Image (cartoon, rainbow, N blue to C red):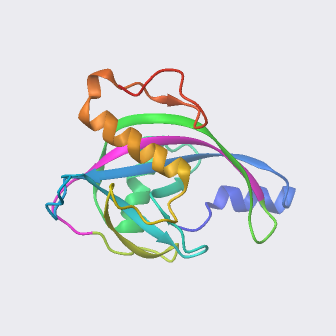
Amino acid sequence: MPTPDYILSLREKIGHEPLLLPGVTAIVLRESTTGNFLNAPEVLLVRRADNDMWTPVTGIADAGEEPTNTAVREVKEEACLDTRVAALLGCGAVGPVTYPNGDVASYIDIAFRLEVVGEDEPAVGDDESSAVGWFSIAQLPSSVAPRFRLLIADAVAQRRRPQGFQPRMGYHKRDKPAF
């Protein structure tokens, strides 16, 4: 999905001035299907069309939209998968980001672990991505940013030991261990 209409309307009024926006990161995990020797879970990644980087599904919440609904919607739009939110992984500040058109934005990002509902395989669902696929967490593409690697590790930790997991409060430090 392209930039939400309410942001385009704001941009008409404020130009390229900085905006603080609500965002989500959806870490979708599944059991290994390749039987790799580590039996490491797989994570869903999309290759962004704008910068060729592999990332988890991310997106901006529509006005009034619950962040959990945003995460599920974005995975459906970008990877054609039905999912459900399984856990909150944390929240943190991201940015500022300056886009090629000069727009500046920072994000309050909420990260969730999601699970696939059904047996469908991912497919590119919109023009924001050029590819989509499952990757072993033990063999992530080199272009996966450190912030996303951290959230993927948090998703695995939360999945393995949900009772001891504490959501991350800020992406730059952790006051308590994940488990």
Q: In which quarter of the image is the C terminus?
A: top left
Q: What stretch is highlighted in magenta?
A: 104-121
x then y, percent, for residue 107? 65, 46
| Residue 60 visible, this orientation | no
Q: Could you tell whether 171 is left or right of 12 in the image?
A: left
Q: In this view, does 53 lie above or below 70?
A: below
Q: Is residue 91 magenta?
A: no
x then y, percent, for residue 171? 57, 37
Q: Could you tell whether 99 is left or right of 177 in the image?
A: right
x then y, percent, for residue 40? 24, 52
Q: Examine the residues drawn in magenta and state their main secondary structure.
A: strand
Name the residue rendered at 59%, 32% in the picture. 170
Say which of 147 and 90 sits in front: 147
The part of the image, by quadrant, that contains residue 118 is bottom left
Q: In this view, does 146 lie above or below 120?
A: above
Q: Does the magenta stretch include residue 111?
A: yes
